[in-house]
C-alpha cells in the first residue's frame, strides 16, 4: 500500500454520492427482503462500497465487468439506475433483467455489466473470454472480474489466471477480500495470508490495496487497467475490505471475532472519503447531511415507483432464452 494521491473534486463528489447511494439502497433492500417484497436471497455489500466506486471510476466506456451475487454496489457504480436495480430485486418487468434475474443476476450490457454470477468463481472465465475477444479484435477495452477471496480456492480462478497470463490478456482480476467465505474465516480455508501472493504462480503482478479508501482503489485499478490496455497483460489486485452484514439473508454473523466489526467501522469507506473532503475544505457536515437526505429520497422514490410496477407476464418465461 502506498501514499494515495488525492483525486479532483468532481471525482471525489461522484464517489461519495455513489457510495451513499449504494449504502442506503442496500439498507432498504434488506428491509424489502424482510417484508417479503424481495424474494429469494440478498447478499449485501455494506462496508465494501469503496471497492465498487473505485473500480467503476477507473474504467472506460466499453470495458466489461463480471462480479458475484454481492454485486448490487458494482451495478450502481457502473451506472445502473436505482429504478432498474430495485425493480429487478422485486421481480418487476421494468427491472434490469425484466424481473427474471433478481438480486444475484443483475446484468446490463449497456453499462458493461456482463453479469453477476451465483456460482463462485464463474465470472472469471467469462472475463477471460471478454478479454480474449478484445485482443483478437484489436480493441482497447479491458475486462474486469470481481470476486471474493473464497473464489480463489476454486479451479476456475487458477485456470483463468493461467490462461490470461500466457496470452497476456487485457483482464484485471480483482479480489474483494472481506475475510469470510459464507460462515468460514479465511484462515480456515486458505493457506496464504494475502490473496495477491497467488499471482506469483502465474508470473503476473499481485497487488494488495486498502479496499476502504475509494481513492486508493481507484489508483490501483487505474494502474492495472493502463497496463492491461497497453498490452502488458493481467494483474491480480486484492482489496482488503469487510462486510458489515452477514453472508446473506438473515445471517447475523455470530461467527465474527469479538470486536472485529467495531475495528472495521472505524475505517468506514464513506467516512474515510468524507473526512478527507472535510479536511480539504471541500465539504462540511451540513452538506454531508443534505447529501444523505437527498440520496434517501432518491432511493425511497425508486422503491415506491417499483412497488407500483407490474410483474412480468407468465409468457415472458419463454422469452430471452436459448433452446
Ligand atoms: C461453485 C460454488 N460452490 C459453493 C457455493 C456456495 N457459496 C456461495 S457464496 C460462498 C462463499 C464465497 O465467498 P467469497 O468468494 O469470499 O465471496 P463473498 O461472499 O465473501 O463476497 C459459497 C461457498 C457456490 N455458490 N458456488
Ligand atoms: Mg469473502
Image (cartoon, grey):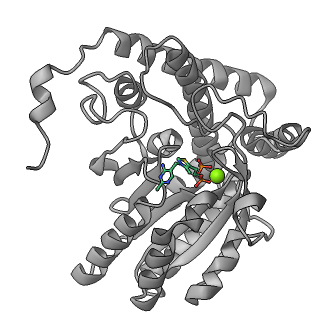
Picture coordinates of residue 223 (x, y %)?
59, 74
Identify the image quadrant of the N terminus: bottom right
* Side of 139 where 73 appears, left or right: right
Q: Is residue 246 visible?
A: yes
Front-most of 297 and 116? 116
The number of numbered badges drawn on the structure is: 0
Picture coordinates of residue 196 (x, y %)?
67, 73
Front-most of 194 and 153? 153
Residue shown at 31%/71% (left/top)? 129
* Side of 308 where 274 appears, left or right: right
Determine whether 293 is above or below 196 in the image: above
Front-most of 264 and 153? 153
Residue shown at 44%/43% (left/top)? 75
* Side of 154 where 176 appears, left or right: right
Residue shown at 55%/77% (left/top)? 235
Residue 260, by quadrant, is: top right
Residue shown at 69%/33% (left/top)? 245
Residue 203, by quadrant, is: bottom right
Q: Is residue 297 visible?
A: no
Amino acid at each position: 500500500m502506498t501514499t494515495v494521491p488525492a483525486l479532483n473534486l468532481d471525482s471525489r463528489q461522484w464517489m461519495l454520492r455513489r457510495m451513499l447511494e449504494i449504502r442506503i439502497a442496500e439498507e432498504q433492500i434488506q428491509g424489502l427482503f424482510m417484508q417479503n417484497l424481495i424474494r429469494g436471497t440478498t447478499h449485501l455489500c455494506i462496508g465494501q462500497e469503496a471497492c465498487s466506486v473505485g473500480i467503476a471510476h477507473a474504467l472506460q466506456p466499453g470495458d466489461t465487468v463480471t462480479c458475484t451475487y454481492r454485486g448490487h454496489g458494482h451495478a450502481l457504480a457502473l451506472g445502473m439506475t436505482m429504478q432498474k436495480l430495485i425493480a429487478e430485486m422485486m421481480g418487476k418487468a421494468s427491472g434490469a433483467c425484466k424481473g427474471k434475474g433478481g438480486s444475484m443476476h443483475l446484468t446490463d450490457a449497456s453499462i458493461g455489466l456482463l453479469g453477476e454470477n451465483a456460482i463462485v468463481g464463474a465470472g472469471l472465465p467469462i472475463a477471460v473470454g471478454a478479454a480474449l475477444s478484445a485482443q483478437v479484435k484489436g480493441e482497447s477495452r479491458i475486462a474486469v472480474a470481481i470476486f471474493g477471496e473464497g473464489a480463489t480456492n476454486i479451479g476456475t480462478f487458477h485456470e483463468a489466471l493461467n490462461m490470461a497470463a500466457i496470452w497476456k490478456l487485457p483482464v484485471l482480476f480483482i479480489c474483494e477480500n472481506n475475510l469470510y467465505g459464507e460462515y468460514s474465516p479465511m484462515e480456515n480455508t486458505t493457506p496464504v495470508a494475502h490473496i495477491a501472493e497467488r499471482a506469483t504462480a502465474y508470473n503476473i503482478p499481485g497487488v494488495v490495496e486498502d479496499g476502504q479508501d475509494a481513492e486508493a482503489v481507484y489508483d490501483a485499478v487505474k494502474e492495472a487497467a493502463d497496463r492491461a490496455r497497453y498490452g502488458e497483460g493481467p494483474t491480480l489486485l486484492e482489496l482488503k475490505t469487510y462486510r458489515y452484514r452477514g453472508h446473506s439473508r438473515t445471517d447475523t454473523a455470530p461467527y465474527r471475532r469479538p470486536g472485529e466489526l467495531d475495528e472495521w467501522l472505524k475505517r468506514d469507506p464513506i467516512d474515510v472519503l468524507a473526512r478527507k473532503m472535510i479536511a480539504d475544505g471541500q465539504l462540511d457536515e451540513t452538506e454531508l447531511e443534505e447529501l444523505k437526505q437527498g440520496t434517501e429520497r432518491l432511493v425511497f422514490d425508486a422503491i415506491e415507483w417499483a412497488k407500483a410496477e407490474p410483474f412480468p407476464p407468465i409468457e415472458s418465461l419463454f422469452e430471452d432464452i436459448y433452446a
